[in-house]
Image (tube, grey):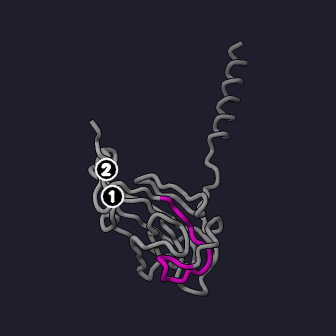
Amino acid sequence: MKAMFRIALRAMFVVGTCTAAPMAVAQSCAVPAQLTPNTSQSLDRCQGETGLVLACNAFPLYGRAAIVRMDLPYPAGLLEVQSMTVGYDPALFLLRAACNNSAGCGYASNSGTVVDSMDLALVDSGSYFLAIATPYPGTPDCGQVLVTYWLTPEQQALLQDGVFRGGLSAPPILP
């Protein structure tokens, strides 16, 4: 009886493990990836957006763009993106409220190296789409980038408290 229970328990564990295994992360405008603070996430630009050819209504993009949805009621922290593909120099474009070729720019960053970062304290509260792409022709169309969203414990507390700043404010409290 105990042996049958152990076998059934192992079978449930294996099935549960397989079911809970992470699935491929979408990263298009229609289905953007999400970031977890203080965790690195690998994004595959081969799964990225093909229709985004102009960032911030000004910069031509070449190849696919990895897209991440970022709702920032209290913009804080640091985004860090590192290319894991030889010959790829990522640039970061924070598109305001929409993910399309005419979206306004909240912020852009391009260091000219394989690692780029963006200080989110420099943007207003709001909803954004982070487009990770390249403004350089002749770069690889597909490949991996490692994205990390760094937040201090103090910044995390502000986000959890729902503190707003910048262009948006919290809804009024009605009596």
Question: Callout 2: 10 Å neighbours few (<14), some, many (20+)?
Answer: few
Q: Name the amino acid, label 2.
A: Ala
Q: Position of residue 30 (x, y in %)?
A: 61, 60
**Residue 70 painted magenta:** no
Residue 157 vertical position relative to residue 55 in the rendered view, above or below? above
In the image, residue 149 sits, relative to residue 61, either above or below, namely above
Farthest front residue in view = 175
Q: Which label belongs to residue 40? A: none
Distance from Cα at disc 2 to Cα at disc 1:
7 Å
Q: Is residue 144 left or right of residue 4?
A: left
Q: Quick check: 100 above or below 16?
A: below
Q: Which mark is residue 168?
A: 1
Q: Which residue is located at x 31 percent, y 68 percent?
A: 122
| Position of residue 138 measured from the top left corner of the image (x, y, whole percent) | 61, 87
The x and y percentages for residue 60 are 54, 83
- Residue 121: name its quadrant: bottom left
Residue that appears at 51% across and 79% down: 89
Label 2: element kind: loop
Q: Quadrant of the N terminus?
A: top right
Q: Is residue 15 left or right of residue 106?
A: right
Q: Point out the stretch of residues depicted in magenta.
A: 54-69
Q: Main secondary structure of the magenta part?
A: strand
Task: Residue 170: give its label.
Answer: 2
Picture residue at 30% right of the left edge, 44% below the top: 161
Q: Residue at x 61, y 71 (%)?
A: 143
Q: Is 68 or 58 nearer to us in this picture?
A: 58
In what quadrant of the picture does the C terminus appear? top left
Tell me whether the residue at label 2 lies in contact with that at label 1, contact meaning CB atoms closer than 8 angstroms.
no
Q: Secondary structure at mark 1?
A: loop
Please, what is the three-letter code of the amino acid marked with disc 1?
Answer: Leu
Q: How busy is the neighbourhood of tag 1: few (under 14 within 10 Å), some, or many (20 plus)?
A: few
View extreme (top): residue: 1
